[in-house]
Image (cartoon, rainbow, N blue to C red):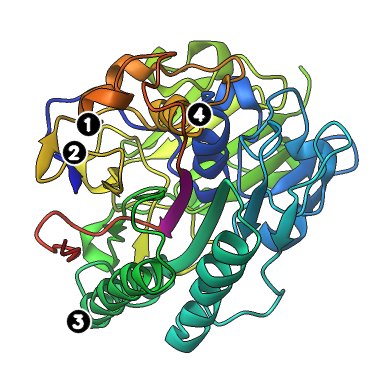
Amino acid sequence: MVYYRRTFNIYPYVLLTLLISVSFFCLSGRYVENHGVIHNMWFNTTTQEKKGYYMTQFVDSYWDNGSLPIWITGLKAGSLHFPGTAATYKGETVRLREVEPRLYDYSNETEWRLNIDKVIGEWFHQQDLDFVSLYFGEPDGTGHRYGPDSPERREMVQQVDRTVGYIRDKIQDHCLTDRLNVIITADHGMTTVLRGAQVEEMILYKIPGFNFSDIQFHLVDYGPVGMLLPKDGIHPHLHVYKKEEMPVWLHYIRHAQLLPIILFADPGYFFPVQFNKGEHGFDNQVMDMKPFFRAVGPDFQKDLVVGPFETVNVYPLMCHLLGINPEINDGHLDNTKQMLLPKKNTEGNNSTGKFCSLVMLLLHYYVPAHVVITWLD
């Protein structure tokens, strides 16, 4: 198995650390400002309409804006519950897809195993797919509700551990060990939300001389991240930028969907719209925001620990493993090929002439460095 080592002195992973933005980051290899799927909610600045996370899944124009996901590359591909699965891209959809139900229990371990049975037993073993993306909404839900350092979240990580073992068992049961590569990663980290005396609140109506009639704005908010559409014409823990003045490492500048004014808070601070005990979406330089990466299969080296790399580099790695030409992207195979066996670590060259299938499992927020997901060969 290949492990990714989380360290402090690294180039940022992704920003902003939100599910939809990062999931499309993995699928397309493009930075947020290039792929345009910029937020967990769709919004229309003309009509002031906003859609929540679930309904955003069905707004084709939000997803299909120039960057093709790896599903739409001539592969026999499938996707189960992965963000973007419901959308149509240049008239095409994922060949086999299952969109998560509107009301869905992310923590149901029995459902997890049924989904794995479908992906491994039916989609790979029976229908011989090339690539499948599989999404689990935990331990994010538990971390939001109880906090990332809670006993409940730790118990959920144990459930994740059992599930990884179940994936391994199913791969062996269906004789896929020698022809199926597995990548397990996450969309972001999570940190504890500060409360009460721990924070200095900024309450607009309490500011001397402030009147809501003096302003008109459209706030696209989610946890610690927001964008403002101001009418024409400082808090110490809230950072406010004109779009063109955003720090370049955030890759959150160029796209037309990005609103003129962007706000994000320091770790622990948030916009009090949702009242979670854990939150993400903060600057990707914050250690708590960094995800993890694990990979195992016939094309990967064993017992290898590699240095950190940006998530955009997962896309060209997947394309290389599948033997397909990548679309224009912001990553490069040079940043990940050291984890591959010699027969597969040369770009454009595969000495066997055969390509293994690939399954990517995205866990909704990272498993901390002190928690080891067990995968035994």
Q: Can you give x and y, in whole percent of width and height, for residue 280 in the image?
A: 39, 52
Q: Earlier in the sequence, mark 1 or mark 3?
A: 3
Q: Can you give x and y, in whole percent of width and height, for residue 229 in the image?
A: 71, 31
Identify the image quadrant of residue 329: top right
Q: Earlier in the sequence, mark 4 or mark 1?
A: 4
Q: CA distance from mark 1 to mark 3?
A: 34 Å
Identify the image quadrant of residue 151: bottom left
Residue at x 29% of width, y 19% of height: 335
Q: Main secondary structure of the magenta part?
A: strand
Pointers 1 and 2 in contact (C-beta within 8 Å): yes
Residue at x 24% of width, y 82% of height: 155
Q: Which residues are magenta?
A: 357-363
Q: Nearer the viewer, residue 174 or 237?
A: 174
Q: Please give the label number shown on residue 301.
A: 2
- Single out the mark in the foreground, 1 or 3: 1
Q: Which residue is mark 4?
A: 319
Residue at x 44% of width, y 48% of height: 224
Q: Please give the label number shown on residue 208.
A: none
- Single out the mark in the foreground, 4 or 3: 4
Magenta highlight on residue 61: no
Q: CA distance from mark 4 to mark 1?
A: 15 Å
Magenta highlight on residue 360: yes
Residue at x 15% of width, y 29% of height: 307
Q: Please give the label number shown on residue 151.
A: 3
Q: Earlier in the sequence, mark 2 or mark 3?
A: 3
- Single out the mark in the foreground, 2 or 3: 2
Q: Is residue 33 visible?
A: yes
Q: Hey, what amino acid is under mark 4? A: Cys
Q: Hey, what amino acid is under mark 1? A: Met
